[in-house]
Amino acid sequence: MKKIASVLAIATILAAGAAAQTASPSTAQDNFSNIRNFFRVNEQICTGGQPSMENLQKMKEQGLCSVVNLRLASEYNFDEEAAMAKKLYLRYFHIPVNKNNLKDEQVEEFLKVTSDPQNRPIFIHCTAANRVGAFWMIRRVLLDNWKVEDAEAEARKIGMHEEKLRDWALDYIKRRQNTDEKK
């Protein structure tokens, strides 16, 4: 695992230098074990459960530009996190997702925010990355052209564990693909 982290860190540094852009957070510097289900998708995107304010500060120091929060404001101290993001000059996107009342509009906003390169590096979170995994699975299939099976496997690594969310994500993907085919 350490060898993989070192290779990824070197690749990140080389890619950043080649692209002549601001360096993104180094995988070797990741130490967010206190964030439930923390997962680095790639050098520009990481996911997880609720971060502490100290985690946000550390991520900012490592180059984080944006935070996407899928939690309902009533689930935790929303004002504290929003204020900290503002203090750190982070772009902050709050897409409140009720897992018992999922809406297509929330996915559309999520896809728009996560597709904008100006928002990267980005950290996407909810309570435990369950909702994040479901939304990320949709993105992988619809925008990144992954096979459903591969996207689902990654979503489970991220933190998706509720079949209800999985089923909803699969239904959304199917409906969207059917709509796109009719165009």
Image (cartoon, grey):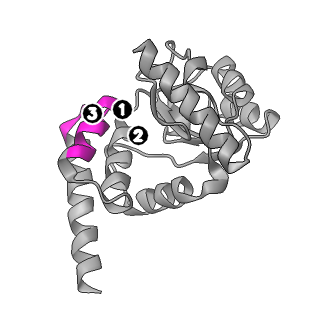
- Say above or below: 177 vs 112: below
Q: Quadrant of the C terminus?
A: bottom left
Q: Which residue is mark 2?
A: 132
Q: Position of residue 105 (x, y in %)?
A: 44, 63
- Say above or below: 43 vs 139: above
Q: Which residue is mark 3?
A: 156
Q: Residues within 10 Å of mark 1 (few under 14, many from 20)?
A: many
Among numbered discs 2 and 3, the one appearing first in the sequence: 2
Q: Residue at x 38, y 46 (%)?
A: 136
Residue 45 in view? yes
Question: For this view, does 118 lie left or right of residue 180?
Answer: right
Q: Which residue is mark 1?
A: 158
Foreground pick, 101 / 61: 61
Q: Amino acid at mark 3?
A: Arg
Q: Which mark is residue 18?
A: none
Dot in front, 2 or 3: 3
Residue 66 in view? no
